[in-house]
Image (cartoon, rainbow, N blue to C red):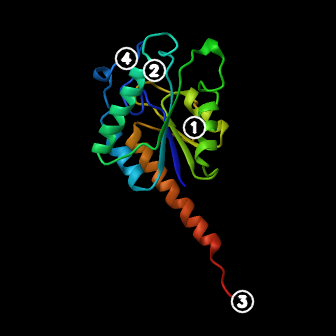
């Protein structure tokens, strides 16, 4: 199954520079996020959020509040015609040196194991090089959404302005992959 990994902050909701989303009232969807998620859902993509949430280990947001934020986010996405199949988050800080904090690929590896994700049709959309490095480590085609910061020589497969543009690129890439698979499977009798 086609799978798209999505970072949360800066991809789905507005990034709070130097701060964390500490309550649902601070969570603000980016304008194209719900339409993009609906578009990917309608294209039968599995959508999995993978997000660093160091505010948990810093005591800024509790795991229970984070869970409430995620539940409300999913309800809003579903009300907009989309869906989220799973959410994975790393609660650690950089200095904890865990395997799940991006740019390390632990969250993605866990999701791949738990959801038996196709090694060919996997994508990652993020807003930082941490996201891109983690996605590349597990063989994802990567897209950096540069809606909040300039990026130079990032190394992703695509750099696009927002999640809707990324969704269009993913769908067109999947269409091209499907066409080439179909051409490869046709056999003319001799």
| Comes first in the chain, label 1 or label 4 | 4
Q: CA distance from mark 2 to mark 3?
A: 63 Å
Q: Visible in this render: residue 32?
A: no
Which is more foreground, mark 4 or mark 3? 4
Say which label, 4 or 3, has the lower sequence index. 4
Q: Kindly state the secondary structure of the residue where label 3 is placed.
A: loop
Mark 4 — residue? 22
Mark 1 or mark 4, which is nearer to you?
4
In the image, what residue occupies the spot 33% across and 41% down?
77
Of the image marks 2 and 4, the number of the one nearer the N terminus: 4
Mark 2 lies on a secondary structure that is: helix
Q: Are marks 2 and 4 in contact (CB under 8 Å)?
A: no
Residue 96 falls in which quadrant of the image?
top right
Q: Is residue 130 above or below residue 17?
A: below
Q: Earlier in the sequence, mark 2 or mark 3?
A: 2
Mark 3, residue position: 190
Does residue 131 sit above or below 32 in this rendering? Answer: above
Would you place residue 142 above or below residue 148 in this image? below
Q: Label 2: which residue?
A: 63
């Amino acid at each position: 199954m086609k799978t798209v990994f999505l970072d949360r902050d800066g991809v789905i909701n507005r990034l709070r520079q130097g701060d964390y989303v500490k309550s649902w009232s601070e969570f603000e969807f980016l304008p194209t996020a719900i339409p993009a998620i609906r578009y990917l859902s309608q294209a039968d993509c599995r959508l999995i959020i993978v997000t660093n949430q160091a505010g948990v280990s810093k005591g800024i947001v509790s795991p229970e509040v984070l869970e409430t934020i995620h539940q409300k986010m999913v309800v809003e996405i579903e009300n907009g015609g989309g869906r989220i199949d799973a959410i994975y988050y790393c609660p650690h800080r950089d200095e904890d040196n865990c395997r799940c904090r991006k740019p390390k690929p632990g969250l993605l590896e866990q999701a791949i194991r738990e959801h038996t994700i196709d090694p060919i049709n996997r994508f990652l959309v993020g807003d930082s090089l941490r996201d891109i490095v983690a996605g590349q480590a597990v063989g994802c085609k990567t897209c950096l959404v540069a809606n909040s910061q300039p990026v130079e020589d990032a190394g992703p497969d695509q750099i696009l302005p927002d999640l809707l543009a990324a969704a269009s690129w993913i769908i067109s890439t999947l269409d091209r992959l499907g066409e080439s698979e179909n051409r490869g499977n046709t056999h003319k009798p001799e």
